Amino acid sequence: DDIDVSARTEKGIIILNTLLLDKPKEINSYLTHEIVHVLQQCFNDGPTQGSNEDDYLDNKFEQEAFREQSEYISETKGDKAAKDYIGHVLDHHDVEGKERKERKKQLLQLAAIAMVFGRNYTL
């Protein structure tokens, strides 16, 4: 679909931006993120909290999806690619200065903790 983000999941249905057709090597990364949302929405005890630009990086459901996506990128393309993707996310959300350094560290730790302790570990 022609949506304002790369991908979105609504009521268990994944919607990909048509622009991803021009980047076929990136589709699996976004699908990894969105499949986490499908599982959250279909198998959680209640509805998931939606996110918007203001709370995206603080939303626990987004953090879980981002953790899986970062791990996927790291496993398939290497740690540098995962770090670069994190940088892209922070650029997109205009995170700068001290907050950027802290967010990057936090998001890298989320992915690293998942790799060390298993996927079900949460902060």
Image (cartoon, rainbow, N blue to C red):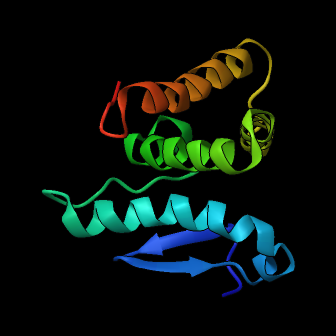
Q: Residue furthest top?
A: 98
Which residue occupies 73% across, 11% down? 98
Assign the N terminus to one quadrant of the image: bottom right
In the rendered structure, the answer to whether residue 73 lies left or right of residue 25 reads left
Q: Nearer the viewer, residue 48 or 108?
A: 108
Q: Residue furthest left?
A: 45
Q: Nearer the viewer, residue 53 or 121?
A: 121
The quarter of the displayed image where residue 50 is located: bottom left
Which residue occupies 40% across, 62% down? 37
Q: Is residue 79 above or below residue 7?
A: above
The x and y percentages for residue 60 are 39, 40
The x and y percentages for residue 101 are 72, 16
Q: Nearer the viewer, residue 120 or 8?
A: 120
Which residue occupies 32% across, 64% down? 39
Whether residue 54 appears in this view of the structure is no
Q: Residue furthest right?
A: 22
The quarter of the displayed image where residue 8 is located: bottom right
Q: How many numbered marks, from 0 up?
A: 0
Whether residue 42 appears in this view of the structure is yes
In the rendered structure, the answer to whether residue 91 lies left or right of residue 118 reads right
In the rendered structure, the answer to whether residue 120 lies left or right of residue 14 reads left
Which residue occupies 43% across, 44% down? 64
The x and y percentages for residue 107 are 58, 29
Q: Residue furthest bottom?
A: 1
The x and y percentages for residue 123 are 35, 24
